Image (cartoon, rainbow, N blue to C red):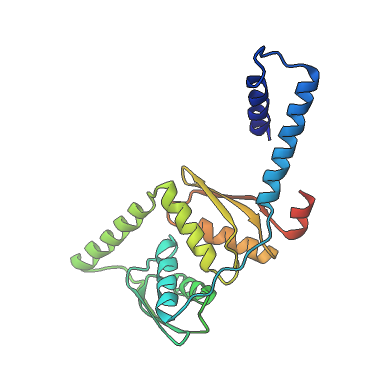
Amino acid sequence: MNSVFFRRAHFWTDMNPSRSTSPTCRLIAIVLALSGSFAASAVEAQPSTPCEALIGDASVAAAIESRLRETSRIQADEIVVVVVSGVAELRGVVRSDAQKLLAEQMTRDTRGVDHLYNQLDVVDWTPVTDFARAQASRRDDIDRSRQVRSDTWITTAVENTLGLSRGTDNCRIVVHTRNGAVVLQGVVATAEARRMAVELAAGTHGVRSVDAVALLLPGSAMAH
């Protein structure tokens, strides 16, 4: 609000050639500033908006693949996604049982998925041969490089995973990113949707922190 206030006050004094501000003028400037901040709050507190349906199996498969590759919690390069009539199948290799479970959860959470067959294999043994060690080192290098992402990329990736999530089902969450710190703003339908939005954002490549203070529930949005 302060920034809005000072912009309003500065605008008002600029409109007066004498640059002298009477008490009446200052009062008007304050009223304008408050009305501007209330309007901004009203925009931020708009109700959640369900996302458009995904059309076709190819779109659903692409949505799953994008979400799996945008998360830092799964090494998804060796995952193949097949979708037929809303039935998804995951094939390939992941590095731990936790990754396999998370891939399953994110796939089930993707809009357009009616059923899932998780055929992922877990390869979690310590590499023994020189070739296997080199491959493991290469994968680790790739994962580290993916943590260096631009703020624009992060914002787009977080918006993508939130918009494709059945759990959040909200295309009106506003995402801001600065130096890897993500801020979420808007209104979500339930506390669980809010929790999921924070988890999905935090798990995106390049994200260092998530601030969800301005991600409100309907009742708290009305209070604001």
Q: Is residue 117 visible?
A: no
Number of numbered discs on residues: 0
On the image, the x and y values in percent for residue 4 come to: 65, 33
* Residue toward you, 25 or 66: 25
Q: Is residue 210 above or below residue 16?
A: below
* Residue toward you, 218 or 94: 218
* Residue toward you, 131 or 90: 90
Q: Looking at the figure, which quarter contains the N terminus?
A: top right
* Residue toward you, 38 or 192: 38
Q: Is residue 50 left or right of residue 86?
A: right
- Which residue is pictured at 50% across the width and 47% down the height? 177
Q: Is residue 96 above or below residue 71?
A: below
On the image, the x and y values in percent for residue 151 come to: 44, 47
- Which residue is pictured at 45% across the width and 67% down the height? 67
Q: Residue furthest bottom?
A: 85
- Which residue is pictured at 69% across the width and 46% down the height? 41
On the image, the x and y values in percent for residue 179 come to: 46, 42
- Which residue is pictured at 59% across the width and 57% down the height? 173
Q: Is residue 77 visible?
A: yes
On the image, the x and y values in percent for residue 10 come to: 64, 23
Q: Quadrant of residue 205?
A: bottom left
Q: Is residue 198 above or below residue 60?
A: above
Q: Is residue 1 left or right of residue 168?
A: right
Q: Is residue 178 left or right of residue 49?
A: left
Q: Residue furthest left?
A: 130
Q: Is residue 13 above or below residue 58?
A: above
